[in-house]
Image (spheres, helix red, strand yellow):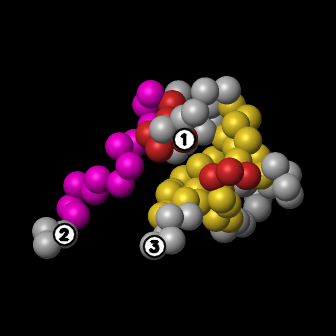
């Protein structure tokens, strides 16, 4: 698999290579030390409560499929319509 950009990752389904945890990449976080993690949120089954996502190091993620949208349709990485102006 080719290296994916942030825009391509968000919205796709991934698996944690270590734990097997699967879900959709819904958020990205970058720490001051340079560590990059993605929030992987599992799908909920009928009659289940919403589960929290797990933040997983990018190096542990294994691409599964396009998830809820094709990579080229993924959001632009966090621009909000009503974002505060600093």
Q: Residue 41, position in %: x, y?
A: 65, 56
The percent coordinates of residue 67 (x first, y second) are 63, 36
Of residues 68 and 47, the one nearer the viewer is: 68
Q: Nearer the viewer, mark 3 or mark 1?
A: 3
Quadrant housing residue 85:
bottom left
Badge 3 marks a residue whose secondary structure is: loop
Q: Please, which residue is most extreme toward the front here? A: 33
* Earlier-in-chain disc, 2 versus 1: 1
* SS type, badge 1: helix
**Alpha carbons under labels 3 and 1: distance apart:** 21 Å
Residue 75 figure quarter: top left
Q: Kindly state the secondary structure of the residue where label 2 is placed.
A: loop
Q: Can you say whether 11 is above or below 1 in the image?
A: below
Residue 84: which disc? 2
Q: Is residue 68 visible?
A: no
Q: Neighbour class for label 2 at 10 Å: few (<14), some, many (≥20)? A: few
Dot 1 crowding, Cα within 10 Å, few <14, some 14–19, many 20+: many
Q: Which mark is residue 61?
A: none
Q: Nearer the viewer, residue 48 or 28?
A: 28
Residue shown at the point (35%, 43%) measured from the top left: 76
Tell me the tag on residue 9: 1
* Span colored in magenta: 72-83
Task: Tell me, yes or no, whether the two marked residues, 3 and 2, touch with CB atoms within 8 Å.
Answer: no
Q: Is residue 77 left or right of residue 60?
A: left
Residue that extends furthest to the right in the rendered view of this protein: 19
Report whether 66 appears left or right of 45.
left
Q: Position of residue 79 (x, y in %)?
A: 29, 53
Label disc, if present, on residue 32 of the rendered structure: 3
Q: Nearer the viewer, mark 2 or mark 1?
A: 1
Nearer the observer, 36 or 39: 36
Q: Residue at x 73, y 52 (%)?
A: 60
| Separation of residues labelled 2 and 1 (CA atoms) | 25 Å
């Amino acid at each position: 698999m080719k290296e994916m950009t942030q825009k391509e990752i968000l919205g796709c389904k991934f698996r944690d290579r270590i734990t097997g945890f699967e879900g959709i990449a819904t958020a990205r976080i970058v720490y001051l030390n340079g560590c990059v993690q993605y929030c992987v949120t599992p799908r909920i089954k009928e009659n289940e409560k919403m589960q929290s996502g797990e933040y997983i190091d990018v190096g542990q993620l294994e691409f599964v499929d396009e998830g809820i949208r094709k990579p080229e349709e993924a959001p632009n990485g966090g621009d909000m319509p009503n974002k505060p102006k600093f």
